[in-house]
Image: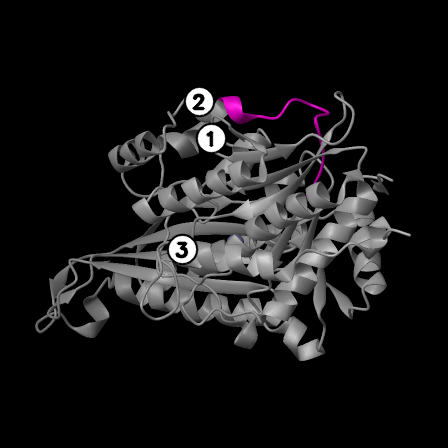
Amino acid sequence: MGITASELRIDSRRMKKDFEELSRIGATDDGGIHRPAFSQAHLKARDWFVQRAVRMGIENHVDGAGNHQAVMSCGKNDAATLLLGSHLDSVPFGGRFDGALGVVAALEILETVKEHGVSLDLHLCAVDFTDEEGAFVGLMGSRALSGQLPRQEVDLPSGSSDEFHRALERAGINRDSIFSAGAATGTIAGYLELHVEQGTRLKETGADIGVVTGIVGIRSFRFNFNGRADHAGTTPMDRRRDAGLGACSLVLKARERFIQNFPGCVFTVGNIDFTPGAFNVVPQTASVSLEFRADDIQTLDAMETAVYGEAGKAADDFGLDLTIDKLERTVPVHLDDHMQKALSSAAEQLGLFNVYLPSGAGHDAQAMALICPAGMIFVPSENGASHSCREYTRWQDCVNGANVLLQTALSLAGAQMIT
Ligand SMILES: [Zn+2]
């Protein structure tokens, strides 16, 4: 008697070969990778995806936002498609696993289904989303596919607009085509993503698998304090309007208040820019780049009110003017309950200890969750390291994650072995 669908497993050696091939593209000497969106290394990784799909005999489609979609038609013609995937771009000098693992696993699942002759009620698609990490526009591909990408973000990308234009050209994309990538209603049955945890909770709990419950929302701002430039030697302390002091006061006071009032949430100041920025000049302006994250809108609103209050006080205390630029605002999302249950029961069936946990990092799944049931699997990150060459996940953990992805996809797609 042949095996049943629930006994199917991915081919660990084949997936490892793929993963290692991909890890060599944009590899750095310290064991990491440097593959920012649209860099030469990223374009090579994109080619690798296409070649991999061709080798499998599967049709690859590139949409207007440059997302790669390798589609395996399994269901009836009018069947919806279950998407599996992640992203091939990296942060500058990032790790090998972030994004790449989810894409390699998605391709391996298609290969496994193909080689075993499984009949499904849904089409399967392995997807590689464009610019997840935001070299130019964060979550560009997944937000374009889910119809959630505001035009102003494409018009005002991070980095220069010209650079973005040239980058898109290199990948054969144009600005307007990005908006044609939106999926037609009803064509997507769901989205599943395997990703490294990028934190330490799985290691701390001894779990093999994390079933992600939701993804935090992020709000980022620039607080601009404006005072007066003065001589650092001849201006008495009580006559100064020192913009630097307003900035420093905001950082410390807001931190204190956030820790007290919003336990579990995170608050970060990543940069402060002083002008004129000389040893012997009292700063005229200080610009504070600040972000915070929480998993519900009410908390994000309360955090925003709190930080405005602290910034206003800091400006008053030091006699400064204040302007605020509102930058990124992503909405926290809850991942589909049915997907969570399906992932957890696939893990149980594979004998893997699994826990439910929220994600503190942004992922393509948060964009997809707005248009279809979306689910995410985390596998343990050694020492929680990520966005760094130190990023590492044991191969057995990668295989476990891929098998949970496989079994969940099979059960959602009503798999039957063809006898
Ligand atoms: Zn990622």
The secondary element bearing badge 2 is classed as helix
The secondary element bearing badge 1 is classed as loop
**Nearer to the camera, 386 or 99:** 99
Instruction: Measuring from the top left, give residue 6's x and y in whole percent.
Output: 84, 53
Instruction: Measuring from the top left, give residue 151's x and y in whole percent.
Output: 45, 27
Residue at x-position 62% and y-position 33%: 71
Give the CA distance from mark 1 to mark 3: 19 Å
Residue 293 figure quarter: bottom right
**Nearer to the camera, 139 or 258:** 139
Of the numbered discs 1 and 3, the one sitting upstream in the chain is: 1
Give the CA distance from mark 2 to mark 1: 7 Å
Point out which mark residue 91 bears.
3
Residue type (three-letter) at the residue carrying disc 3:
Val
Residue type (three-letter) at the residue carrying disc 2:
Ser
Classify mark 3: residues with Cα within 10 Å, few (<14), some (14-19) or many (20+): many
The residue that mark 1 highlights is 65
Which residue range is magenta in the image?
180-191
Is label 1's Cβ within 8 Å of ligand 1? no
The residue that mark 2 highlights is 177
**Looking at the image, residue 321 lies above or below residue 156:** below
For the C terminus, which image quadrant?
Answer: top right
Q: Does residue 174 show up?
A: yes
Is label 2's Cβ within 8 Å of ligand 1? no
Classify mark 2: residues with Cα within 10 Å, few (<14), some (14-19) or many (20+): few
